[in-house]
Image: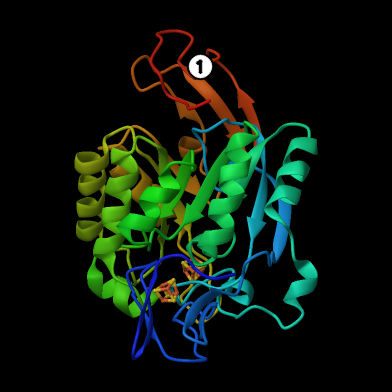
Amino acid sequence: MEALYYIPSAKGVKCTLCPHNCLITEGKAGICKVRRNVNGKLIAETWGYLSAVHLDPIEKKPLYHFFPGRQILSLGSVGCNMHCLCCQNWQISQVPVPEDGVSAFTEPSAIVRKSLSLSGNIGVAYTYNEPTVWYEYMLETARLVRQAGLKNVMVSNGYINAEPLQELLEYIDAFNIDLKGFTDKFYREYTGARLEPVLQTLKQIKKANRHLEITNLVIPGQNDDIVIFRKMVDWIATELGTDTVLHLSRYHPAFRSDEASTPAATLENFCRIAHEKLHFVYAGNIQLKAFQDTYCPVCGNLLVSRTGYDVTVQSLTNDGACKRCGRKVISC
Ligand code: SF4
Ligand code: SF4
């Protein structure tokens, strides 16, 4: 499939999908390994190749304030425009399309039919590896999913240029975006990308009034400086609002990282610090009772209780407000 968002030139093709803006010479692929210059055209090699298709709890994305307790058909492909040292999904994120990939070819219309056939399913999530690098397939599927009256969710590292994101914003209902740290140095050294474009993505999603939750993986010795963490929380509260949902996740060693797992006490401390400025802070990859349920920030009513993926809606109106005081909290 010919890619969207590229500029041909005498030196090759320039992909303008993400802030790497790779200049790709004949026969080569970009940093993500899956967008290749073939005879002067940029080809999205992942189109239709899916490495995983699962019906997941929406909480697994994680999204805690978007149709809690429901399920979503979740798709993954291969490739990524970051190279995080601790990537949990490196077997699919750091590889090109397998040679037998065509056998897994799945038309967007087939995904929609499957979505509609699954009872309790709210729509389709583009997730597992970085969906930006399979942009064309996601966009086409998302259009059809929207037409079918279902929801679209994108789980992303947020490394995408403004113009393709704007086109996508028309169809994606909810985002979980990784904010992996709050210094450019960390982004460059740990992910191979830059911080500022991710901040721009978050602001653009907020401006478009789409449902937005953020995940930050707390990695010991890498991005756990409390002063910098406080700056990140301040930025979220100021630029995106104090209702922005923040998931703080426990890191475990994977891929090229060997730091020990995040101590539970560190994660709990970070949750408390974030909760000083933000109404909704949750701990991920760990059970921390104080940071797993949703409470109304106005009257303190318990709205949603969670034990792992066991979710109980306790006290919400049909449109996601607190039953006691009417404060809107959840998108549904
Ligand atoms: S999407 Fe891939 S090829 Fe395009 S600019 Fe980003 S890393 Fe490069
Ligand atoms: S952005 Fe996500 S998928 Fe890509 S390398 Fe980082 S952790 Fe892995």
User: Above or below — where is 41 with respect to 293?
Assistant: below
Q: Position of residue 127 (x, y in %)?
A: 57, 56
Visual colour scheme: rainbow
Q: Is residue 247 visible?
A: no
* Among the 4 quarters of the image, the one containing residue 325: top left
Crowdedness near tag 1: few (<14), some (14–19) or many (≥20) residues, C-alpha within 10 Å: few
Q: Which residue is mark 1?
A: 319
Query: Quick one: SS at disc 1?
Result: loop
Quarter the N terminus occupies: bottom right
Residue appearing at x 59%, y 60% in the figure: 128
* Left/right of residue 144 with respect to residue 120 in the rendered view: left
Amino acid type for the residue under numbered disc 1: Asp
Q: Is residue 113 visible?
A: yes
User: Above or below — where is 6 with respect to 171?
Assistant: below
Q: Position of residue 37 (x, y in %)?
A: 49, 84
Residue appearing at x 30%, y 77% in the figure: 188
User: Above or below — where is 182 with respect to 81?
Assistant: above
* Left/right of residue 297 with respect to residue 173 in the rendered view: left
Q: Position of residue 301 (x, y in %)?
A: 45, 16
Residue appearing at x 49%, y 38% in the figure: 173
Residue appearing at x 51%, y 43% in the figure: 288
Please state which of residues 58 and 154 is positioned toward the viewer in this rendering.
Answer: 154
Please state which of residues 144 and 64 is positioned toward the viewer in this rendering.
Answer: 144
